[in-house]
Structure formats: C-alpha cells, structure tokens
Amino acid sequence: MFSFLKPNLTTQKAQGKVIALMNQKGGVGKTTMAFNLAHAFAHQGKKVLCLDMDPQGNFTSLFNVEIPEKHMHHLLINSVKELKALHTSVLISDLIMKTEQEEGVHIDLLPAGQELSGFELTVAGINAPRQLILKKFIEKYELRSQYDVIVIDGPPTLGLLVVNILCAADGVLYPFVPDRFSEQGLKNILQVVSDIAEMEITSTPKNLGYIPNLFDVRRKQAGSDLAHIKETLGEAFVYEAFTNKVQFGKSLAQRKSVFQYKSNEYKDLQRQFTVMTETVQKELLS
Ligand SMILES: Nc1ncnc2c1ncn2[C@@H]1O[C@H](COP(=O)(O)OP(=O)(O)O)[C@@H](O)[C@H]1O
Ligand SMILES: [Mg+2]
C-alpha cells in the first residue's frame, strides 16, 4: 500500500557502509569488537562482509578458518594496474569465504595473512595514489552494492595500511582500554585522520565513537581514569564500557560471537552490541 509514495526505494542500488575498528595499540579489542559487531548486524538480517586488514589474521582465525595462501594482500596488489603484471592474478570470487556462523546467520570474509605486512614496501614505487588502494578496491568490485555493512579490522600500527583503511571507511570506531596509557594511542590515530584531511585527497571517515573495553571494575582508579579520558575525547560518542568478562573471553576462545549463546550471562553483551549497531547507523545517516 502507498508504494507510489516511495518510488526509488526498490530501484536504488544498496549503499553499503564501511566501518573500521581502529587503534594503534594492540590488545584493546579491535578484533573482538569487529567480530561481534559484524554478528550483531548479521543477526538483524544485514548482508555483512568482514575484511581483515591485520597481517596477524586474528579476525580471520576467529571465523575458524585456515588462513589461505592468497588473501587480502594479493587482492590489493592485484587491483593496482601497475603491479598486476608482476604478480599471479587472483579472483576476489575465489577468495571470499562464505561462512555460516549459525543456522541462518551468514557472514562473508576476506581473510588476511602475514604477507600483508609487506604491503607498504610492495606499493612503494607506484605512481597511483598509494593511500587510496583499498578505497579503489572497494569501488572496483562494487562491494558497497553487494553488502549492507563492511566491517574492517585494523592493524595495531600507523603506517600505509592504516591510511588506506581510514581513506576507505565511512566511519571509524575506536576501542580502547581506559588506563593511563590509552590517551596517546588514540591521539596518534586521530592525528593520522587529520593528516588525511589536510592532504585533501579524499573525505575523512566519521568518528562513530569510542568504545572503552576491558574496563576493570575492581581497580580503584578505573572509574576516575575513564572519566578523565572522556573529558579529553571531545564531542564524539563514548559507548557504555565493556568490562573484562570471563564469558566474553570464553566466547572468543570458542570462536563464537556473544549472539551464539542463549544463557542469561550473555544478554548484557548482546544488548551492548545491538545498541552499537543502532548508534553506528544513526551516526552514519546524520
Ligand atoms: N571485554 C573483554 N573481556 C574479556 N576478554 C577480552 C575482552 N576484550 C578483549 N578480550 C581479549 O583480549 C585480547 C585482545 O583483544 P583483541 O580483540 O584481539 O584486541 P586487538 O585486536 O585490539 O589487538 C583477546 O585475547 C580477547 O579475547
Ligand atoms: Mg586485532
């Protein structure tokens, strides 16, 4: 009924959003958050692609698959015209892993492996803009029209891989551990975002908010440390903190998302990730 009121909706191409989880520091929960956020979207019926951009391949491993011989690194290199002739060609259709996480919940994955750590060197001499390789890769394969959400797990570095992710993403979530050392790590990555803005080569991703993780409720200073950091973060949204939870750790060890458990102890975690999907969508639309 009244379908004539919205003539475009069915004919419009899907405009998927690219969301990256970033922090220069390791062990803050980037991979954990990326994995569970992807599942939260998939549970809502969204078509989700997970894109591993960390040479350590932890994101890939969480999907309980072996890291294949050819992966993100080879796809990215192959997408650069100048380098194509130097490498054996790979097809994205051969590399996308279609996973069924539980009955009816499907997530596609583009895996990564350690060769990706050589990305910066491999593209060092090219004439095309090296910062935009991932962005152009996503455009070339029209990934936004095939997926509702593309979740990128970033590496704990600040080099060219990170610049590529920041140039390709529509929005970034910043997980961090609220301790005395977290401020500098966040400042460093935000500096890269503002460097990209200054280069004026592409638009910069929206700050979708900060995710305090591994919040230690038993530590006396934890509350005041978090309050202090919040003050320094400015306008962006700060999510409800994720505490250091045994059952969260257990789910990751079993390579499962928090949505794959029915027991009550996972309800809070499920709610937190569902709220995250809602906030992310609202932020990306505004
Ligand atoms: N809230 C949490 N509660 C318990 N364990 C967690 C939590 N967040 C992360 N972890 C564990 O901490 C480690 C680091 O998390 P990870 O997501 O790999 O960080 P990063 O990707 O930033 O390096 C992993 O072993 C993960 O299972
Ligand atoms: Mg990681």
Image (tube, helix red, strand yellow):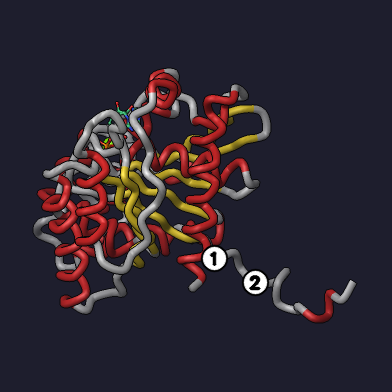
Using the rendered image of the protein, determine whether residue 211 is visible from the camera's viewpoint.
yes
Disc 2 to disc 1, C-alpha distance: 8 Å
Considering only vertical position in the picture, is 199 above or below 71? below
Q: Nearer the viewer, residue 30 or 178?
A: 178
Q: Which residue is mark 1?
A: 15
Q: Residues within 10 Å of mark 2 (few under 14, many from 20)?
A: few
Q: Secondary structure at mark 2?
A: loop
Q: Residues within 10 Å of mark 1 (few under 14, many from 20)?
A: some
- Beta carbon of the mark 1 residue lies under 8 A of ligand 2: no
Residue at 31%, 74% (x, y): give it. 203
Q: Quadrant of ligand 1?
A: top left
Using the rendered image of the protein, determine whether residue 95 is visible from the camera's viewpoint.
no
The amino acid at mark 1 is Gln
Quadrant of the rendering where the N terminus is positioned? bottom right
Determine which of the numbered discs, if any, sits on residue 83 in the image: none
Residue at 47%, 60% (x, y): give it. 17
Considering only vertical position in the picture, is 7 above or below 138? below
Q: Is residue 138 left or right of residue 48?
A: left
Outermost residue toward the front in this view: 220
Q: Nearer the viewer, residue 246 or 6?
A: 246
Instruction: Pinpoint residue 134: horizontal percent, then vertical percent.
Output: 31, 57
Instruction: Pinpoint residue 244: horizontal percent, then vertical percent.
Output: 33, 29
Q: Nearer the viewer, residue 228 or 30?
A: 228
Residue at 58%, 43% (x, y): give it. 42
Q: Secondary structure at mark 1?
A: loop
Instruction: Pinpoint residue 19: horizontal percent, then vertical percent.
Output: 40, 55
Q: Which residue is mark 2?
A: 12
